[in-house]
Amino acid sequence: MVTRESNEKGQSSELSASQEVMRMLVDSVDEYAIFALDPQGNILTWNRGGEKLKGYSRDEIVGTNFSRFYTKVDIDRNHPANELVLAAKNGKYEEEGWRVRKDGTPFWANVVITALRDEKGVLQGFGKVTRDLTQKKMAEKLLRESEERFRLIVESVQDYAIFMLSPSGYITTWNKGAERSKGYKAGEIIGKHFSIFYTEEDIRAGKPDFELREAVRVGRFEDEGWRRRKNGSLFWANIIISPMYDGNGELLGFSKVTQDLTERKKSEDALRTAYAELEDRIGQRTKELSEAKARAEAAVKTRDNFFSMASHELKTPLSSLKLQIQLRKRNILRGNLSGFAPERLGELCTEDERQIERLTFLVDNMLDISKLTSGALKLSLETFPLNDVLKDVVARLAPILDNSENTCRIESAEEVTGTWDRHRLEQVFTNLLSNAGKYAPGKPVDIKIFRKGNSVVVSVQDYGRGISEKDQARIFNPYERVGDHGQTSGLGLGLYITRQIIEAHHGELKVTSRLGEGSVFTVALPLDSGRSRSDS
Amino acid sequence: MAERILIIEDDKDISRVLKKILESEGYQVECAENGRQALDILERASLLPCMILLDLMMPVMDGFTFRQVQDSIARFAAIPVVIMTAAGDIEEKKIACRAVAALKKPADIEAVIDAVKATCA
């Protein structure tokens, strides 16, 4: 007994010693309110943590009911008592909830209530540990609110598609901007792979995966390029892909921000195009201006050449006439009349006539050119056989052609009559024949006249030096005198005027020529120039 | 023996009347239609002319070219040349052609005869 008693005593003293240590331990804890309740919830013990947390001293709190820590709402719904019931029933009850301090301020508490039973299992009371989680709660709340705000901001952004991708590129979130620019609703796109936005070409090239790899490797991937909308249309996008990691450095996924730059690109492209066009036009205009300047300068030079040629051409027959007349006068004054025998007088007159003919021809050409340039060339139409005109012209040019030792051969199978301007056609053939005399002296000239359908064709062929292909294009221009300057005489107007007259008759003038072999000028005239004119 | 004159002129009417004028003055006259023909005549001539009456604008070989060729052949270089031209700036052309005199077309018969006589004296 004694032993037992002493044992019990010893045990009891050991127990009380350990209880004391325990009490001190509990008491010193100031992060937690740790206290005991009786089965009805009246407070039996109190510790420093309780005092700090709830604001009550041991003296004022022990013996009161623990329900005073609860909010009115909780008290009204009998929550404190229910907690005890649940703790008693389950051995333990844990919750987080609002509690009230002595000064009335609420705090967010983690509460663990443990049922305390004796060896027989009879409920002796409860142990209660309360922890103040207000700071954590507030932080969580703030975080949640900030996350929510951020989510709302991201969601409401219209101009940027902002969404998240899983580590392997599947879409996990979606915002309004994404919906707007890409055309998908959140419900139909979340869970799809983001390569859906890429062109087939980019997909084949492995671009989507490359971009994720690059984002991981470099920390960020930015690009501009064509992306596809739901309706298949393309838009020009600026995209930024950023990898996101958790606290342990584990890849959570990617954020992707896409900006639709189609409009910007369009305006940039338009600007670039407009700029290029402008530059082109400036270049073109500059070129045109310098060409116009060159043309104007060439025209001035041509005109100067023309005046110099014209004076030379006019002075040649004048020189001849002047010297002839002065020679005769001199002979007459000296009484040397041997040159004036009656049969010689006719020859002298013919020579003078020829000079006058040449002067007339030159002056006519100069007048014609002024008419042609002012568009005042008028035809006086009459009906006559063209053969007659050719014969007349050949006869009239005989002195000139004889002078250049040309023999003229006319070949005509039939008489071709038509309606033309006689005087102008005389001019045409005078020009062509005098050219033959000029460029093919000493050679025959073959003239052929024949009818071809409703037209008459006259060809004038010489066997002179010919015209190079390059020059053939130039000979019909006014003031052009093909060949080196000074090598030929004339105003350079003959063929120009000739062609103008033929075209006024709705006809055609062509040349075929080979250097060293001679040239063929072919005139084709409708038989009735008047009617063709009204037809056309 | 009559002195010889070579006329180089493409217009046959002019050279014909010049020939008549100079023949009436007692010269022996030959005509060439261009520089090329004139060189042929000179090459063949046993007796060189006392002067050349030269037109400038001519086909085949013009007066300027003829003068260059003439000067390059020692035998012909000394033959004095009188130019005839219808163009302006006649003094300039006279210098360019190293001519002893220049006649402006249409020239007076006296001017022609005086120039020839002065040159062939």
Image: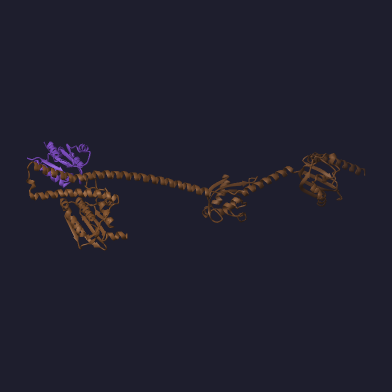
Chain colours: A brown, B purple
Residue at figure coordinates x 13%, y 37% from the top left: B114
Q: Quadrant of the C terminus of chain A?
A: bottom left
- Looking at this view, name the residue that lies furthest to the right: A1
Against A424, residue B53 (above or below) is above
Quick check: B52 left or right of A215? left
Q: Is residue A196 left or right of residue A352?
A: right
Residue A395 is situated, as x and y percent measured from the top left of the image, at 16, 55
Whether residue B39 is visible, yes or no, is: no
Describe residue A474's horizontal placement relative to residue A98 as left or right.
Answer: left
Question: Residue A82 in the image: x percent, y percent?
Answer: 82, 51
User: How many labels sit on residues?
Assistant: 0
Q: In terms of depth relative to the viewer, which is nearer, A347 or B10?
A: A347
Residue A77 locus on image (x, y percent): 81, 50
Residue A317 visible? The answer is yes
Query: In this view of the protein, which residue sits in the foreground, A254 or A271?
Result: A271
Can you give x and y, in whole percent of width and height, for residue B95 in the image? 21, 36
**In the rendered image, which quarter contains the N terminus of chain A?**
top right
Q: Looking at the picture, tell me which residue is in the foreground, A364 or A124.
A: A364
* A198 and A370: which is toward the camera: A370
Q: Is residue B35 above or below residue A509?
A: above
On screen, residue A344 versus residue A12, left or right, reads left
Q: Residue at x 49, y 47 (%)?
A: A268
